[in-house]
Image (cartoon, rainbow, N blue to C red):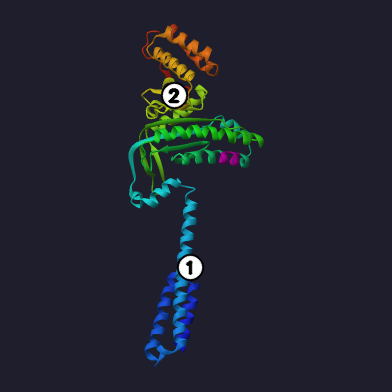
């Protein structure tokens, strides 16, 4: 009888303890009941003995299920918590592909996007820290949601800048196209957010986006003190520079030629050929206009004329280029200032270095950091 009482006490008391302590106690209770079973005559036919064994089994099963359920809930909470600090698609990728966690980094083709708020420093001076935090978090939320919607990975937030990439952790053949559609959607969503901010007495949000495609090293990088999943390489640096070029050309999105050639379903307007800081090779810049199916015949005709003007300009045919740029500036009022820049630049080139084969290349190394 004493053994049975001890066994029952252990069985019912174990659920109040951790599994590491509870399991040995349950085992001890089972041993005590087994001892009674073999020592006491006719114990197997005693209904109270059978009831005690059944109760112990129920308590043990309930305890096991409760512990497992608690652990699952805890793991889900921890997973949801850390998904705020690492890209959710990266976490999901490693859940489905646990062997990938052993990889450090590898080289693959990616499309990189940088999104930045224009005049952020000036705006930050006008807001107290709490309002600035809320203003920035709303902006980060909109941009990040669109990036995830189009399959991108948010790499990091840097001040007011968002860096994202397509093509990792999961490989993609449509990374350039996805980034272009995301950039367009970001513009639309931020425009709506900007109106909401102004209605609350907060500053409007105007953004610039730079996009570049190329081979980069992507994966876990850092030290034993801190690791991060990120991408490094020429397209990252280029996308960052192109984002800064948006202010110079006063347009929202600038894409590199390496991205443009991979998005045939989009129409682009060539902006320039430039030399940016930190890069020896020149970069041809393009402005995304719209998907091909949305373009009117008039837009197609205007872009063809623009392309011809840019071709004359690159070939040093200054008179022909100036004539077409002047015509475009007269017909396309929305881009009049853009074409005026080219007319002024051509007039300066014809005066100072008309025979220079690289006169058409704009040096932005000093103007854009």
Q: Nearer the viewer, residue 358 or 337?
A: 337
Q: Position of residue 344 (x, y in %)?
A: 49, 11
Q: What residue lies at 44% left-to-right and 89% top-to-bottom?
A: 46
Q: Position of residue 86 (x, y in %)?
A: 45, 47
Is the residue marked by circle 2 packed among few (<14), some (14-19), or many (20+) residues within 10 Å? many
Magenta stretch: includes residue 133: yes
Label placed on residue 268: 2
Q: Position of residue 256 (x, y in %)?
A: 41, 27
Q: What residue lies at 47% left-to-right and 71% top-to-bottom?
A: 63
The image quarter in which residue 293 lies: top left
Q: Is residue 41 left or right of residue 121?
A: left
Q: Nearer the viewer, residue 355 or 52?
A: 52
Q: Nearer the viewer, residue 248 or 303?
A: 303
The image quarter in which residue 168 lies: top left
For label 1, the residue is 66
Q: Is residue 344 visible?
A: no
Q: Residue furthest bottom?
A: 41
Q: CA distance from mark 2 to mark 1?
A: 60 Å
For the magenta stretch, what is the residue range?
A: 132-138
Is the residue marked by circle 1 packed among few (<14), some (14-19), or many (20+) residues within 10 Å? few
Is label 1 in a helix, a strand or a loop?
A: helix
């Amino acid at each position: 009888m004493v053994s049975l009482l001890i066994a029952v006490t252990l069985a019912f008391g174990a659920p109040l303890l951790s599994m590491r302590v509870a399991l040995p106690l349950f085992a001890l209770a089972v041993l005590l009941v087994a001892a009674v079973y073999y020592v006491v005559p006719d114990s197997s036919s005693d209904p109270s003995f059978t009831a005690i064994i059944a109760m112990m089994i129920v308590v043990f099963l309930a305890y096991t299920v409760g512990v497992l359920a608690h652990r699952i809930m805890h793991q889900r909470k921890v997973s949801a918590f850390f998904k705020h600090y690492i890209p959710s698609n990266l976490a999901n990728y490693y859940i489905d592909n646990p062997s990938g966690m052993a990889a450090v980094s590898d080289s693959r083709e990616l499309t990189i996007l940088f999104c930045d708020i224009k005049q952020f420093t000036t705006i930050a001076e006008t807001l107290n820290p709490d309002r600035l935090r809320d203003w920035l978090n709303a902006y980060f939320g909109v941009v990040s949601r669109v990036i995830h919607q189009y399959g991108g990975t948010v790499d990091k937030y840097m001040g007011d800048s968002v860096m994202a990439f397509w093509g990792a952790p999961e490989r993609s053949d449509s990374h350039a196209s996805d980034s272009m559609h995301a950039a367009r959607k970001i513009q639309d969503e931020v425009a709506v957010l900007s109106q909401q901010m102004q209605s609350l007495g907060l500053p409007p949000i105007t953004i610039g986006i730079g996009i570049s495609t190329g081979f980069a090293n992507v994966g876990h990088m850092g030290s034993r003190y801190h690791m991060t999943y990120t991408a490094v390489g020429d397209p990252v640096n280029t996308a960052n520079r192109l984002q800064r070029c948006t202010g110079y050309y006063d347009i929202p999105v600038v894409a590199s030629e390496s991205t443009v050639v991979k998005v045939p379903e989009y129409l682009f307007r060539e902006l320039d050929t430039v030399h940016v800081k930190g890069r020896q090779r020149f970069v041809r810049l393009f402005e995304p206009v719209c998907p091909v199916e949305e373009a009117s015949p008039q837009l197609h005709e205007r872009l063809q004329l623009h392309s011809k003007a840019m071709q004359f300009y690159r070939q040093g045919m200054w008179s022909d280029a100036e004539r077409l740029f002047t015509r475009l500036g007269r017909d396309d009022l929305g881009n009049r200032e853009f074409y005026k820049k080219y007319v002024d630049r051509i007039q300066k080139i014809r005066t100072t270095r008309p025979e220079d084969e690289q006169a058409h290349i704009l040096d932005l190394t000093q103007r854009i950091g």
